[in-house]
Image (spheres, rainbow, N blue to C red):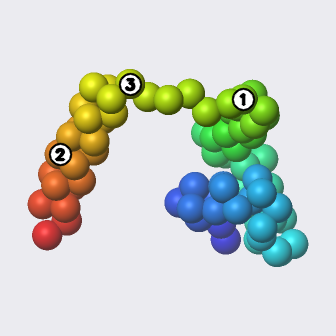
Amino acid sequence: MTGCRKLLSEVSNYLNGDVDTEVRQELEAHAAKCPKCWVVIDTTRKTIQIFQGCEPYPIPEGLQKKLQKALQKHFQESKGQNS
């Protein structure tokens, strides 16, 4: 039986068509019964379609540094919680 965690871990592979038929059918059956997972799939699919043809937009250096610091802080905090 497929649950939300399985769907979330496979959503990228599912949308890329990189899952076997059995897994695809399990994910689709779960999403048909779970509105939250259906929204994740639908929103991710639409986001990919919107940005697929766009050129990359460079992140300003100051923002990039802030983002890196925030990610490092988040990683360190989550690593401390899992210890």
Q: Secondary structure at mark 2?
A: helix
Residue at image position (43%, 28%) is 59
Q: Amino acid at mark 3?
A: Pro
Q: Is residue 58 above or below residue 71?
A: above
Q: Amino acid at mark 2?
A: Lys
Left or right of 54, for residue 70: left
Q: Report whether residue 46 is seen.
A: no
- Label 1 Cα neighbours within 10 Å, binned few <14 / some 14-19 / many ≥20: few
- Mark 2 and 3 residues: CB-CB less than 8 Å, in contact? no
Q: Which label sits in the foreground, 1 or 3?
A: 3
Picture coordinates of residue 10, whole percent (x, y): 64, 62
**In the foreground, 62 or 50:** 62
Identify the residue position indicated by label 2 in the image: 73
Q: Earlier in the sequence, mark 2 or mark 3?
A: 3
Q: Which label sits in the foreground, 2 or 1?
A: 1
Residue at image position (57%, 62%) is 9
Identify the residue position indicated by label 1 in the image: 54
Residue at image position (87%, 72%) is 21
Q: Earlier in the sequence, mark 1 or mark 3?
A: 1
Q: Secondary structure at mark 1?
A: loop
Picture coordinates of residue 65, whole percent (x, y): 26, 35
From mark 2 to mark 3, how far is it between C-alphas? 20 Å
Picture coordinates of residue 72, whole percent (x, y): 22, 49
